Amino acid sequence: MLWVDQHRPKSLAGLSFHGPLTARLSAMGSSAELPHLLFYGPTGGGKKTRCSALLRAVYGPGVDKLRLDSRSFTTPSKRTLAINLIASAHHIELTPSDAGIYDRLVVNEVIKEMASHQAIGGKRGFKVVVLNDVDRLSKQAQAGLRRTMERYTSSCRLILLCSNQSKVIEPLRSRCLGIRVPAPTVDEISSVLTAVGEKEKIAVPPAFAASLARNSGRNLRRALLMLEAAAVNSAALTAQTQVVKTDWEQYIETLAREITQEQSPAKLLVAREKLYELLINCIPATVILKSLAFHLMQNIDDDLRHEIISAASFYERRLCTGSKEIFHLEAFVAKFMSEYKRYLTNMFL
Amino acid sequence: MPPPRPLSSTSSLGMGGSSGANKPLTLASWGSGAGGRGEKRKKPASASSSSSKPSSSKPSSSKPSSSKPSKPSKPSSSSSQPAASSSSSSLWTSSHAPSLSALAVHASKVKEFQSFLSSSATPSPSSPRLLALLGGPGTGKRSLVLAAAAAAGYTVLEYDDTYEPPSSFRQDLPPGAPFDPSQPRPPRSRSQLDEFADFLSPAVSGRSLSPSSSSGKILLLLSSLPYLHAEPQRERCHSLLASALLSTRVPIVLLHTDLSESGAKASPYELEKLMGREVAGSQWTRVMRLNPVAKTILKKALKAIALSESSLSGSPLDRLLDLVCDTAPGDTRAAINELQLQLTVLRAGPGRTAPPARKTSGGRDQALGGLHALGKLLNAKRGPLPPNSKEKRGPLEFSPEHVVETNDMALPSIASFLSHHAPAFFTDVHEMSAACASLSDAELFVGKLYAERDRSETTYPEQYAVSLLGRTVAASNLSPAPSTFRPLNKPPMYENQVREAENRVKIEDLQQRAGSHSTFGSFVCDSLPYMRVIAPADSSLALHSHVRGGGENARRRGGMEERLRQDPDVLAMDDIEEDDGDDW
């Protein structure tokens, strides 16, 4: 088991940062009622950890007995799709956006089913449905969610998790108590890294911990993974120990370097191969685009940055609305090549 | 084992092949109604027969029998009808089956076929045994075989995919009872392939002919092979054919209508797909191709029919024939049908003697084959610039919208192909960027078109997508790459999607084993790369990879997987090391 999962705090008392938030959550956990909740904040900030700690405070250790389930749904067009769920006696957790365009169906079915059985054996009269990645839900699914939510309030509470609150429709946000979980600061991450190091009996130099925290983009999960990878790679950690980057990021970095070196139709064909390779390895297209855009930003002059970021945001939208990702990724690369080449030519005129 | 259905070549009326003979029900009934009136003028004796139905038979029985004359199960009623009625109520394509001399096939092709027949008759180990006769619809494949076989005194045993062993649907009828199509047939209990096998094995030995046939010479005609989808069945069919080829004592002719663009040669691959590798490569197999019928030949054949069926002659007839030939270029069957239609209309309209000046009925769309159309769109050739024009480029030589719309490929495939191949046709980065942007627009439209087709009532403006796609390269490519041969291979988009899905399953499986409860996206982006470092043994997945060099994908995939198994991210590392060597 990875350190990230192994050393994840199980109870609210074990949480190490965001003190005021933890105090509010424990007050909520000990009260009889629980509102619908919307946890939002950047990835690796501890939303999920706080959510499960809260559930533990509400229901006791029973929620730790998890089982993995695969549930199949039949769509109106008679297709069956299987969705993985994690469930305990008191709650159920799923990522409905896995169902693609059928997310509305999955959300409605699951909540209806949860609500139709009265909670038994718990001290609470309701069960909880945890939905991951609500910001990736379609608008229809979100609208459907808001009705379902109202209808079954008596027997079922929802906890929604998302990284971007602005992609959640207004009515849904108004029905939930929003809980912002900000990214931990560099110092907070460093202290967590040191604590984990102590448990694993590894000395983590403060300078190295700080460098990990910065390199992770204040993403605690990634920082912990980096720490573990570094610990595996080298016998003793020092401030100079190499920080391990993810392979796909290095790959994108190479790609960014290549297309700033040469701009030609032939180079686009080379770039296309790399994009395909990333897609085949299941890296989400939006992540590819974002990472590529920000790596490109480092290579170019300030004057050009605005153009590139506006192109990136345009094609980000295209990725959401279109159906074949490679078209739009390629169009972004071509756009960059064209803009950059024009910039270079103007410079030497 | 039921004996194969003997088909005497002299009784065969089949000008139209299986497709013409199988579905003339609606057309034939039209012909009998409208044509009957016309007959009055010419042949008063038979006028009554067109409306009269023999009282002894059931009303519906005469049509299937006359439209499918090759069936031996001809009801007794039709034989009592006057001969003229069958010609007036049936299609001319079947009633005017050509003799060898009247065949609308080029004389050299007829000779080629005859030489196959004669050389197959000589008992030598190298003599040919099977002839694959290819050609577009209506080029006279079947007519050629029937006419030439009849002239050379062969008896034709014919198989097509509607073949049923003679006993299978008559077993529960008392002998001599008229065949009644309104009665449901007993369900087929055997597969088409089994029946094909039953037909083939006695037929090739030439022993199970019915005693009525006097001539010993037999020709086996496979008008079509059983219609098969699944690979194992197709393989069995091919092996049946191969064993027939090995043991046959009679010449076999296999007809195949290829729908490729006219003039295109059948590739070895297509032949292999049709007959199987073994048969296609055999020393006993010959391939012959009938080209679309030349206009002069077609016109001559049509004239003979028109003169026998109508009183029209001289220049009105000539004009009509020109018109008909243009409506159905190179297709004898369609041309004869068209002629029948035109003449029937002429007869029906009182006082109308002149043929219409323009084409009045359907005809067919002239569509380019898939790859040809793509080549047009990608090359985007332009004509010369008209004098004193302000434009920089000449006009396009084609209409992009028309090319896209009449193409037989679906819009998403066209989009994929264009996007895959377009960069090779550009030299300028800015122009290519414009093309990519427009392809991205087009993809958006096409995607919407297909995603929302079944859900929303509003039809998405397909025209936009068509126009955008068609004009992508033409509009943006001001300085095209010099034209050269560029192979158009399949875009790897679909294969890559499949691989991505397979990889996803593997990664999800690993995620479950690792007990990680994070979402899939964050597992792939964060956890998985580090897990490869932390616990390489546990997290090594044989993930598929995108291999360079499109066409080689399938072949090299096994090798790639092997490499990846040894080191899950060998490909990514390779690339990075390679590029770190650069002086940057």
Image (cartoon, coloured by chain):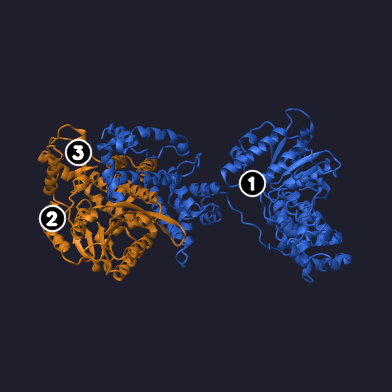
Viewer-nearest residue: B410 or B256: B256
Q: Chain of mark 1?
A: B
Q: Chain of mark 2?
A: A
Question: Same chain for marks 1 and 3?
Answer: no
* Label 2 secondary element: loop
Question: Same chain for marks 2 and 3?
Answer: yes
Most extreme residue toward the top is: B125
Q: Identity of the amino acid at label 3?
A: Val
Eye-nearest disc, 1 or 3: 3
x then y, percent, for residue B186: 70, 56
> Which chain gets the orange colouring?
A
Q: Which residue is mark 1?
A: B258
Tell me the quadrant of the picture where the N terminus of chain B can be found: top right
Horizontal side of residue A250 vs B241, given as left or right: left
* Label 1 secondary element: loop
Eye-nearest disc, 2 or 3: 2
Q: Which residue is mark 3?
A: A243
Instruction: Looking at the image, tell me whether mark 2 or mark 3 is earlier in sequence order.
Output: 2
Q: Identity of the amino acid at label 2?
A: His
Do labels 1 and 3 touch, CB within 8 Å? Answer: no
